[in-house]
Amino acid sequence: MGFGMLGLAGLLHSEGLLTPAADAAPVQPLAPRRPHFTARAQRVVHLFMNGGPSHVDTFDPKPMLSKYHGRPLPRANLRTERKTGAAMRSPFEFRRYGDSGIEVSELFSRTAAAHIDDMAVIRSMYADVPNHEPSLMMMNCGDGRLSRPSMGAWINYGLGSENQNLPGFIAMCPGGYPIVATQNWRSSFLPGTYQGTYVDTQHTDVRRLIENIRNESMTSNEQRRQLDLVRRMNEMHLDARPGDAQLEARLQTFELAYRMQSEATDAFDFNREPLALRERYGNTTHGRQLLITRRLLERGVRFIQVWSGAGQPWDNHDGLERNHRNLARDWDQAIAAFLTDLKARGLFDSTLVLWGGEFGRTPVAELPALSGRDHNHYGFSMWLAGGGVRGGYVHGATDEFGFAAVERRMHVHDLHATMLHLLGLDHTRLTYRYAGRDFRLTDVHGEVIKEIIG
């Protein structure tokens, strides 16, 4: 009867009829599971512009900055203690695009020209503090201070993965770890199988992209025998410690690593794509990242996070015009090609794409020269596309200078709640019991912003 119940549990998990218990890992942790209600999106791509891109230079035009350029802004409109100087106009031209006529900077002209009518631009985002570390944690994990599971881990916990031979959550960041490193894609108190798998996309050879993807010293059959022995030893260890989440995760990780050897080698080999398509994405790190992302989506990976690079590439306290232009050049071409490719392959409507950083930047310049901007969490911009999003729509607004969100303000918790809703998950019901309380991505906050839903 015990074996029969285990078999039944596995069957129910695979059919999405059984959600994991809050205090134990499921038999197959990444088996697909049904959402709480009908989903608009099935998977997520998070384009993370870490460091904080300037909203007033990308998706939130502010003509008043030209009027006050080089002069102090009215004090009533600058509620900050950070040391900054005079107003700084945007060095980039804004134009209206598409039937919706949404204004976008020249930095993202290709993306806007091809896709603005399918995007919801949020101009009223705000966070809690103007520092990278807590703001990264807030955007990724829903809390700026304490150890909490990341958004990708929560989504895989709630929905599982459509491919048991690849991780359900992949984080691609070229050149090493970003600020606060693996905390950005951790599973925290969720079972370890839900954490993100890091890939260093500065490399082009799949053997360097994914460490130890191939075993050069033994055959596949020899590996299988070795893995079976290790599994039996781990299972003996687990018998004496039932319900140990770390041991369960270890068992799952060994199996996944073995299965990945053939599947991942194929998925990450972007050279299998036609040359014309590779050129459309661009022969750049970001072009390659997004081409790999599309290949992973086709193979059922649930959550993919694509970073700008190690450190804080968009953190331009000086030299903003040069640095933002260089960063956006590769991203703009790659994003435009990526969204076009998703549409052509029938993936766009079921894939939720999010663009943005951990905060924005001030309308006033850093001292002493008018060449860069400081951190600004009071108001910034992000955009969503695909996956049930209302296209050609602008949500909210900052004040006339772009300093603070003033209309239909949207906190990071609201963003998370809305994204989970599009995935068919009620953010108040997606919980995990730990240390005597039920935790969730949005903590005790968050509202679904229904105007963004198409």
Image (cartoon, helix red, strand yellow):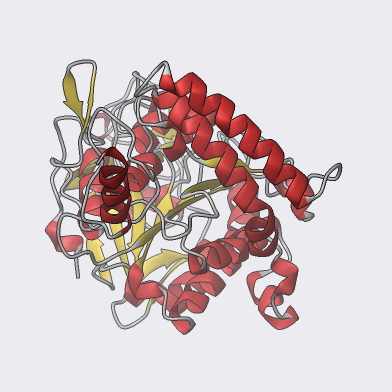
**Relative image position of residue 365 (x, y in whole percent):** 48, 35
**Relative image position of residue 409 (x, y in whole percent):** 18, 45
257 up-or-down from 317: above or below: below
**Relative image position of residue 138 (x, y in whole percent):** 34, 32
Q: Is residue 321 visible?
A: yes
At 26% from the left edge and 36% from the top edge, which residue is drawn? Answer: 441
Asked where in the image residue 125 lies, by quadrant, the reply is top left
Q: Is residue 256 left or right of residue 142?
A: right
Q: Nearer the viewer, residue 431 or 253?
A: 253
Q: Nearer the viewer, residue 108 or 50?
A: 50
Asked where in the image residue 446 lies, by quadrant, the reply is top left
Q: Is residue 124 left or right of residue 213?
A: left
At 52% from the left edge and 59% from the top edge, which residue is drawn? Answer: 92
At 42% from the left edge and 39% from the top edge, which residue is drawn? Answer: 194
355 up-or-down from 223: above or below: below
Look at the image and tell me in which quarter the C terminus lies: bottom left
At 31% from the left edge and 25% from the top edge, which residue is drawn? Answer: 80
**Relative image position of residue 443 (x, y in whole percent):** 20, 30
435 up-or-down from 344: above or below: above
Look at the image and tell me in which quarter the N terminus lies: top left
